[in-house]
Amino acid sequence: MKILILGGTGGLGSDCRNVLGREHEVICPGKEDVDVVSWDVVIEAFDSLSPDIVLNCVGFTNLEACEADAFTVRKINVEGPRNLAQSSARFGCKIVHVSCGHVFDGRKGMPQPYFEDDAPNPLSAYGRSKLESETAVRGNSPNYIIVRSNWLYGIHGNNPIKSLLRHAVLGGSTPMRLPNDRFGAPTWSHRLALQVRELLNKDGRGSYHATSSGYCSPFELAQHVLKKLKLDAPIEPCSLKDLSIGHLLPVNCVLENRLSKKQGVNVMVDWEKDLDTFLEQFGDQLIEEARP
Ligand SMILES: NC(=O)c1ccc[n+]([C@@H]2O[C@H](COP(=O)([O-])OP(=O)(O)OC[C@H]3O[C@@H](n4cnc5c(N)ncnc54)[C@H](OP(=O)(O)O)[C@@H]3O)[C@@H](O)[C@H]2O)c1
């Protein structure tokens, strides 16, 4: 199959490009070649490339920037997916769109997870844009997969593990404060790429949750990373309400992969297992890259 990946230079997109490229013909234009915000550019890309599948890994993901810039967040996170969904429908191709757990308010009592059909109620401009993106995809393409994930990390792009390691190698004495009253499943973007591949190979359709199993707090995640890499860095637990963006963050970010489990296509594993594999594979490289 010919797969057009948009956002292929980002954290998730890079892993999708590697994983899907092993079995499929993958085309991965940069933003400068295919800006998803432009309808003319998108339709021209579909016309000239004739993909069987389009995978949308594009995103404007910085929470504070999204609050501050309603215009850009709407363009990239809503109009982009709409352009892709309408083009997919017009050219008879399947669209895979990546969304996230910020569509929920996170007020469900722990340890109850969120299911695919739970009522969304986003707390932030980012979450609202992702919810709107889902509506745009569902409403415009008859053949879609929406994959909601959370707390992604990987070797490409930026993520909280890389921020922690930068803090660790700087060796300062000021503690990094991390919430210990917010919970989710850290999810390796490589694993999510494998899940996307599985859904494509099994002709999945509809809206899927796809995160690692289990959960921890950001503070526990940091403890786990430092211990595994045998690093010593000052970190301190705090409450979500101590953070300036705490009100924008769902407390309960735990998603249950109910649909993929029901269909026998869930390939996600326990968060600690994947994180350990990731750190064993990339720990030295990550520490090296974290040095100023
Ligand atoms: N990170 C997470 O924890 C997380 C969790 C759940 C879901 N998601 C979703 O997963 C998707 C990918 O996230 P990510 O963390 O991999 O993001 P990322 O690393 O920030 O990558 C975003 C990608 O989008 C590209 N892009 C931005 N604007 C574009 C435009 N107008 N046209 C074409 N490409 C454009 C970027 O290109 P440049 O690099 O050239 O700007 C980059 O390749 C997003 O939809 C996000 O909402 C992320």
Image (tube, grey):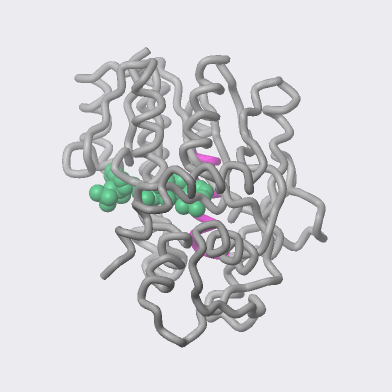
Horizontally, is 248 left or right of 117 in the view? left
Q: Is 138 in front, or is 176?
A: 176
Q: In the rendered view, would you say 82 is above or below 288? A: above
Horizontally, is 263 left or right of 224 in the view? right
**In what quadrant of the picture does the C terminus appear?**
bottom left
Q: Is residue 122 magenta?
A: no
Q: Residue furthest left?
A: 32
Q: Position of residue 66 (x, y in %)?
A: 42, 64
Horizontally, is 249 left or right of 232 in the view? right
- Residue at 41% in and 18% down: 93
Q: Position of residue 149 (x, y in %)?
A: 57, 44
Inspect this view and state whether residue 77 appears: no
Q: Is residue 133 magenta?
A: yes
Horizontally, is 25 left or right of 112 in the view? left
Predominant SS of the magenta segment: helix
- Residue at 61% in and 38% down: 210
Q: In the rendered view, would you say 12 is above or below 179? A: above
Q: In the rendered view, would you say 245 is above or below 159? A: below
- Residue at 46% in and 65% down: 63
- Residue at 73% in and 48% down: 114
Q: Residue furthest top?
A: 1
Inspect this view and state whether residue 219 appears: yes
Q: Position of residue 65 (x, y in %)?
A: 39, 68
Q: Position of residue 289 (x, y in %)?
A: 30, 59
**In what quadrant of the picture does the N terminus appear?**
top left
Residue 5, by quadrant, is top left
Magenta segment: 124-136
Q: Residue furthest bottom?
A: 173
Q: In the rendered view, would you say 272 is above or below 177? A: above
Q: Is 194 in front, or is 232?
A: 232
Residue 86, by quadrant, is top left
